[in-house]
Image (cartoon, helix red, strand yellow):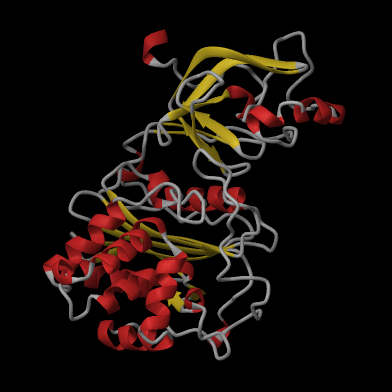
Amino acid sequence: MLRISRHSPTPSRRTPPRTLAAAAALLCLAFTCAALPHPGAAAAEPRTADDTQSTAPRTPQVPAGVTAGVAVFDRQTGTFTEQLNASATFRSASVVILLLALDFLWNRSPAGIPDADRARLDAMLRSSQDSAANHYWSTYGGPAIADRMITRLGLVDTAPPPAGYEGYWGYTAISARDTVKIYRHILETAPGDVRDFIMQRLRQSTRCASDSFDQHFGIAAAFNRPWAVKQGWSAFSAKGTCGPGSGTSTRTQAGSAAPATGAAGVDLSRPALHTTGTVGTGDRSIVAVLTLHPDGTSYGKAYTDLGRLTRSLKVPGGTAPTGTWYGTWGSDVAVRNDPALGDNLLTRLPAGVEVLVGCQKKGQAVSVPPYTNDWWAYLPQYGGYVTNIYISHPDNQLPDVPLCPEQR
């Protein structure tokens, strides 16, 4: 999908005429329909690889309207570097998959499990596959899984889904501090083959989840590898569009039929987006960021807000990727292998998401009258290009982004 910036003779990109919507619609076949750009979007500050290692005091930056529970544990020093509402409970969404995998492997060696279970665990841990989670939840006792793991791991805030919703594994209550305990068990207490089996798959997290949502938000976007992640999301009505096709699935575990709250007042209705995992060599830091967003929040907005919160945390061992964060506009914006239109689609961005721009170069000119632009932004975390038309900035060439090496 493209976004078109202006040449100097054309109207300002900050105040596009509403009548241009029809012109933009003409390009739907090539790019998927997008709304016209909204005014006021601005670039974020550049971040360098040294940012996350600063010794300056940090305060978690929770965006307006977001409810968050945060815990960051430094395994090297054995201390928390961040705790914000760390005991507050949230519905787990698919973060509970960690407990499903641990429960199944509790008295089993990964080397001896059937091929069908190996395939299910692989899809569940790497791509958050709902059908695999449904299988383990329904086959091995549903809420009893949560009860067993609470006892085994000494979890203090975790609870099974509320009465009447026993089949909804995503309604399991969890806190940031309990999430840290789960990862500490995997890394420090679980048998080595179980630890390696789970962590290897979390390190191989796929960008596109099985329901077509882009799941490389939060930790995966805020830090350079090595990292390992298990993400969670629910109650977003927008279609998933990650990958070269157009996704049509939604995360249904937290549908509109849910009660407003579950046991102990856990919110079961507002959109939830969680990023959990480890960061740094030797899995130095364990990071858990659990968030709820106002009703009606788009996936791209929540993705961006969670990213900003995660980037504000002190995470020992983590290094921030080099580049400049920019907002985008439009829906299903295409990321392409080359700075040109054609049969080169890599994936599509969540609508309105913030992206890291590493460099820019000239490529094929793209036009939606009166906008035309031949500059393309390279997104290192996607390994591809988007036309600068869809970067939220009024100029064709971004002023604070270097040229890609071959054009310097």
Q: Residue at x 42, y 61 (%)?
A: 128
The reply, left or right, for residue 394 in relation to residue 116 is: right
Position in image of residue 373 (x %, y %): 63, 15
Between residue 43 and residue 24, name the one nearer to us: 24
Residue 87 visible to the viewer = no
Quarter holding the N terminus is top right
Position in image of residue 20 (x %, y %): 82, 26
Decide: is 220 above or below 341: below
Residue 399, located in which quarter of the rendered image? top right
Q: Check the image and name the residue furthest to the bottom.
A: 163
Residue 286, located in which quarter of the rendered image? bottom left
Decide: is 246 above or below 170: above
Q: Residue at x 18, y 68 (%)?
A: 110
Q: Residue at x 74, y 27 (%)?
A: 14
Picture mark count = 0
Residue 24 visible to the viewer = yes
Decide: is 382 above or below 86: above
Quarter holding the C terminus is top left
Q: Residue at x 50, y 84 (%)?
A: 161
Residue 136, located in which quarter of the rendered image? bottom left
Position in image of residue 273 (x %, y %): 52, 60
Between residue 405 and residue 247, name the one nearer to us: 247
The reply, left or right, for residue 63 in relation to residue 37 is: left
Position in image of residue 10 (x %, y %): 77, 13
